[in-house]
Amino acid sequence: MKKIKFIILYLEAWLGSAKAQFELGHIYRVDCGMPNEAIDQFRLAAEQGHRDAQFQLGLIYDSHGAFQDYTEAAEWYRKAAEQGDVRAQYSIGFMYEYGGGVPQNYTEAEKWYRKAAEQGHRCAQFTMGYIYHTGRGVSKNHGEAEKWYRKAVAQGSADA
């Protein structure tokens, strides 16, 4: 039965289904250890606007392995972030904060961290607190810092 499901998924991916391409990419990456094939499938889906595939490509290129390419990672994170992916919003914010694959830009970093924080991303909320506490790219504002730290703590952040 698994073999039949895989064949059907493969055919759907071959016919251009972004959902099937994403699922096939996940199988190649996680279950089969075939990163090149995973990248190929994720790229096919990502180019059709599949948000999760875009994020997965960002992760792959943001890795410390053979596929590391921070510029490529930033491009895919941005595409997913623009579609509202909270993980990608946090990741592209991080890249702007530290200049990974994009020019360092604290204002852009704050913009993306804020988008993720407003969607409830705990690490982004903590980072927003830190940004306002230190004045990194914004004016120092201890009230704003405390607000974001409290949101992070309410979600279980031990760091805040």
Image: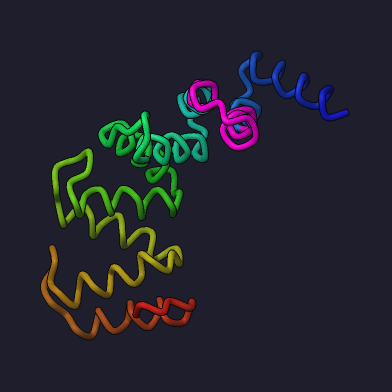
Residue at image position (48%, 76%) is 155
Q: Residue 12 vs residue 50: left or right?
A: right
Above or below: residue 30 compared with residue 104:
above
Above or below: residue 37 compared with residue 76:
above
Residue at image position (56%, 26%) is 34
Q: Residue 24 vs residue 126: left or right?
A: right
Q: Is residue 7 magenta?
A: no
Residue at image position (23%, 60%) is 110
* Residue 149 location, quadrant: bottom left
Of 126 and 59, which appears nearest the observer?
A: 59
User: In which quadrant of the rendered image does the N terminus lie?
Assistant: top right
User: In which quadrant of the rendered image does the C terminus lie?
Assistant: bottom left
Q: Residue 113 vs residue 140: left or right?
A: right
How many numbered marks appear?
Answer: 0
Q: Which residues are magenta?
A: 23-40
The majority secondary structure of the magenta stretch comes to: helix
Above or below: residue 151 compared with residue 138:
below
Residue at image position (60%, 25%) is 21
Query: Residue 39 at x, y = what percent?
Result: 48, 26
